[in-house]
Structures are given as structure tokens and as C-alpha cells.
Image (cartoon, helix red, strand yellow):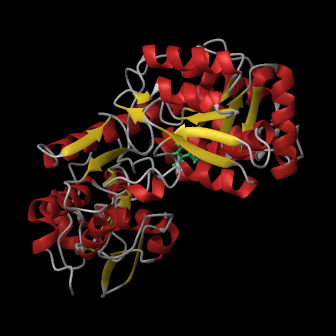
Amino acid sequence: MSVKHGTRWVPRELPAGVPLYLALADRISEDVQSGRLIPGARLPAQRDLAEQLGVDLTTVTRGYAEARRRGLLSGQVGRGTFVSPALAALDAGVGRGTPGVTDLSLNLPPRLESDIASEALSNTLARSARSVHSMALLAYQDNAGMQSHREAGAAWIGRRLPDADAERVVLTCGAQHGILVLLSRLAARGDVVLTERHTFPGFVGAAEYLGVRVRGVDTDDDGIDVDAFRKACRAGARVLYTTPTIQNPTTVTMPASRRAALAKVARQYGVRIIEDDVYGMLALDAPPALSSYAPELSYYVVSLTKAIAGGLRIGYVLSPTASDAERVAAGVRVTTWSAPPLMAHVASDWVRSRVAADLLKANRAEATRRQALAAREFHGWSWHANPSGYHGWLELPDEWTSAEFVAQARRRGVLVTPADAFAADADSATAAVRVCVTAPPGRPELEDALGRVRQLLEVGPWTSARTM
Ligand SMILES: Cc1ncc(COP(=O)(O)O)c(C=O)c1O
């Protein structure tokens, strides 16, 4: 449970091997990060906590002072100690922090209980500042990214495509930017780009922005239907945009046989593929990337933002050839010159030092714990999810429309996203909602929100107060 105003917080057991006051400050920090301690929550009086923990008063006084020094606590002598309310403003990233509402509508990496990311960030920044290369990170760099950053990108992509080499890698500001740049290179205004019937809205937005027409292709439980794809290719489509692993929103992962069959058709018609693999590394058992079946046609897009941290905004595009990569880099030049070298440096450092691998593992583990909660809550309902993915797809009973369900859920204090938001085109209507299990700060909040969604399913639309 989160510690709200007026309830009592007690830290978990303080670890041995560190001075106790620092251990206490660390516990406060962890609980603030995990959402167990929310901004404004009151901490126990120092004397009470000392008694409860069996430590002397000075330890608690110094622990609180250390936490205050870190900007975690505020308060005045005699009036109590509180989690700094200013943290609410700092933390109010997208989807974090609307009081009374649990937001299950955004696909974010989960907030972790451990300090891996914050420790890694301070180490990386401290080392970078002292490095002889620090000024290079503040200078304009090549549009494709610095050579060492492209190499780190190739290493990251290499987890899914072992042949990736730095000459074919271009850094972008996240996968969204990669998609925009690729669409602008591969499709002209008025061209048709194919995708799953329900697809990532950021792709549809980019296509609309560029005047490219999007057509949804029929799918089944294994992803894009091969015959429907062939028909659309025959009708003149130029490009396929697809997310073959943990598709957003349906969570479908295409088996290897489907990837091979789609690649064969693409090759037959010379249709280029944009493979969006932002969730590929979350899946433990993902088949080889689609790009490996038609490397000469495929542009592979990935980022560190989904698997590692949303605010890093570093992504990579792997092109079929080095010359194709140069053309992609030209697209980066006109949109942003280059991905920010300092952020790319953080990303590269983490890829090389294994921080990225550790964070990926931790994010995956947290997502797995949360998916288990969702699987339990939605047992018996039409719930689709990858066991280590960030989101799930809830198909609704016939009596619901997505819009009605979303409105009723909102009245119950839970935000979910209607299927319509993911419709590739006007033919893609269905009654379903996407539920993101990693969006809320803590598991207790998630469990509570999932319970409210399940109750809504049980109650049905007629008994809910929709006429109010
Ligand atoms: C399928 C898909 N691709 C790309 C993105 C955007 O990723 P990034 O944050 O790296 O721009 C998202 C974000 O939700 C997504 O779901």
C-alpha cells in the first residue's frame, strides 16, 4: 500500500554493512521511488521511529537529515517531517500523478524498487564530466551519431540481429523519430503503407503528418494474415510497418513461420519493411527479428526508451546497407541534426557496461510480476498479454463498446485506452481496450485498479450508472 497522508510508514529492515543512518535514508529514497511513500506523506516522529527500529535517536535524526539533503523530505521543527511535496511536480512525467486516478493508458517502463538507474546515471555523468572527451559531447556531431555510439547501437541491436554493424546504424531520438524519418524516406505523399488492423498510434500520426495513406491488413492470432498482405501488395502498397513482437496494442508475437511467409511475399513484390521492435527484448522467447528473413528490404527500429527508460530518447535504425543508412542520417539531419550526444553517451555507456542489460532484466521482472496480477484478475475474460510485456489487450463482451467501457472505467478512477485509438483505418473497429500494467508507480495501486476494471466487466454496461 502507498503511505498516504496520516498513515504510518515503517521502513523495511535496514541492511547491515552501511551506516544505519545512510541505510535509513536509502530506504526513504527507495520507497519514494517505488511510490510507497507519496509526496506529502508524513513520516513518523523521530523518537517513535528510533524506538520502533531499536536504534538511537541520533541515527534517525541523521537519516532524516541525509534524506532532506537529497531533496526527499521537508518539514519544520515541531511540525513534523514530510515527503517533499515538490517531488510531485518533479515526478509528474507523462502518466504520473493525477490524484485519485490510476492511469493504465500509457506504455511506460515500470518504476523499479531498486536504484540501478539513478546510481548508474550519477556514475555515468560523474565519469563523463571528468573524461577528456566531455567537450565532444557538447559539440555538434555526425548526423548518424558518434562512431562509438553507433557501435554501442550495433551491440544493442546485436541482441536481436547478430549481424548488425555500426556502418548501418543511425541514432535517432527514440523509435518514434526513427519511424518518422523512415516513412519520409520510403514513402511519398499519397503512397499506401500497410500495417496491422490495430497499430501504434504514433505511426499513424507520423503517416498522417507526411500525407502517407495507412491501410490496415487483417490479422489472426499469429499476426498479419499472409493472403491479405499479398493482396494488399498486389494492389500497390510500397511499405509495411509492423511490430512483430508484443504488438502494440494486441500483444501478438508472430511465430517464425509467419515472419518467413511475410518476408517471402514482401520480397516478391519489393515491399520494404519497417520492423518496429521496441518490445522485442522484453519477450523471453521472441523468434528471430522479421528483418533477419528479408535483410535487404528491412529497416529495423529499436530504442532504449521502452526497454530501459522513457526519457533517454535514444533509438537506433539499422538499414539494409551503409548507403541506406546515409540516407536515413540525412533524414535525421533535417529533423534534429543528430540525436543528443550526451544522451547517446549515457545510452552507450549503459549498453557497454551492462547497466542496460541489468535494467532490461529488472524491467522485465517487474513487468512479469505485474502481468501475473493482471492474469489473475482477468482470468476467465478475454485477456491477451505476453507474460513479460508492459501492456495487455482486453477484448470486451458484445454488450460493450470500447468508448462506453473507457467512460465507465474513468468514472471508477481508472484510465484505459479504447481500441479506436489504435485503428489503422476506418475498417478497424472492435470492442477492446489496452491496459498498461507498468504505468502505475506501485503494484498495490495496479492491483486495485485492475480489480476495478474487472468489477466493471462483471457488472456490465446496463447496471453501471451510465445515465448519470
Ligand atoms: C510500437 C511502438 N513503437 C514505438 C514507440 C515509441 O518509442 P520511443 O519512446 O522510443 O519513441 C512506442 C511507444 O509507445 C510503441 O508502442
Q: Please name whichever residue, 56 or 450, is drawn nearer the observer in this view of the structure.
A: 450
Image spot of residue 463 (x, y percent):
10, 73
State whether residue 356 is above or below residue 335: above
Residue visible at 51% across and 15% down in the picture: 261
Near-viewer residue (287 or 427): 427
- Judge by depth and name the residue closer to the eye, 381 or 51: 381
Task: Locate residue 405, reporting x and y percent.
Answer: 27, 65
Seen in the picture, residue 236 relative to 157 is either above or below; the reply is below
Q: Is residue 346 left or right of residue 201?
A: right
Position above or below: 388 against 87: above
Count all numbered tags in the image, as a single digit: 0
- Image quadrant in which you'd find residue 154: top right
Q: Report the residue at 87% width, 30% height from top.
A: 326
Tell me, yes or no, if residue 126 can be seen here: no
Describe residue 210's horizontal placement relative to residue 202 as left or right: right
Split into 4 quadrants, where in the image is the C terminus?
bottom left
Q: Name the quadrant of the N terminus.
A: bottom left
From this view, report whether residue 319 is shown above or below residue 115: above
**Left or right position of 30 against 263:** left
